Image (spheres, rainbow, N blue to C red):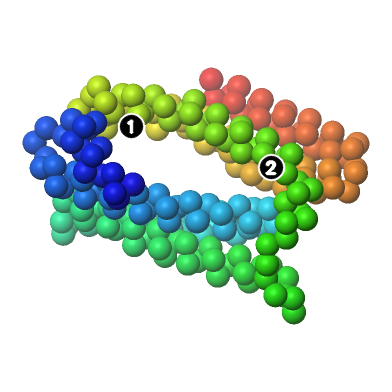
Amino acid sequence: MPLFSSYITKSWIHYNSLSPFIVSRAFAIMSIVTGLRFFEGFYKSIIIGLERQVLSNKIIIVTATIRNFGALLLITKFSNSIDSFFLWQGVVSVLTLFIFYLKTYKLLPTSDRKNRISFNIIKKTWNFASGMIGVTFISLILTQSDKILISKRLTLEYFGYYSIAFSASSILFSLIVPISQAMYPRFCKLVESQKKNLLAHHFHLASQLVSIISGSAF
């Protein structure tokens, strides 16, 4: 992304009064932050997979508070430039990644064996993993393609309004995600142990909980 930031700025974004250099540099910083968030999600998924959701949520609450309130303090008291905002996001992303990294390796069992990639495990789970990759890819297209198209048509100001409206409409989804994160590792554990009756019980329980929360929100 940093390599294409200038191209995106000149051929895609309507930045009005902002200078192309500032917008291009903001895109470069955003791409780095996005890469850090990807690895952050990797370690967070490991902690959730170990069914330590409370620990994961504590880290998220602390780092999100630092990220958002720190950015608010920065732009209101010290510097309101775009660079300052995204640089702060990058600093907090590095801090968050480091915390998740430490906590992940602290939770993993110790072993005298050297760490290596097990291709046998990848082969055994490839059908499931490839299906999940496909679902994630399709979901990414369905949920993000509108922003790509609209960013070409609107100025950054109106695109910002659209992003705020989208975030507000995603509150319901945010209520459902914690349930999915809490139940999915347990589903996997029950499938592995061949406890189908208990799996069905937990699945129906989670479905009822989702229905109640989503229905109440409307």
Residue marked by disc 2: 129
Q: Residues within 10 Å of mark 1 (few under 14, many from 20)?
A: few
Q: Residues within 10 Å of mark 2 (few under 14, many from 20)?
A: few
Residue at position x 34%, y 58% from top?
Answer: 90
Residue at position x 66%, y 30% from top?
Answer: 210
Circle 1: residue type:
Ile
Residue at position x 68%, y 62% from top?
Answer: 117
In the rendered structure, find residue 164 and report the number of the disc placed on it.
1
Residue 112 % position (x, y): 74, 79
Q: Secondary structure at mark 1?
A: helix
* Closest to the observer, 76 or 193: 193
Q: Does any portion of residue 54 appear in the rendered image?
A: no
Residue 8 position by quadrant: top left
Does residue 203 sit above or below 95 in this rendering?
above
Residue 53 % position (x, y): 63, 53
Q: Secondary structure at mark 2?
A: helix
In the rendered structure, find residue 3 and report the number of the disc placed on it.
none
* Closest to the observer, 111 or 201: 111
Does residue 59 sit above or below 10 in this rendering?
below
Circle 2: residue type:
Ala
Residue at position x 50%, y 66% from top?
Answer: 99
Report how many numbered discs are placed on residues in the image: 2
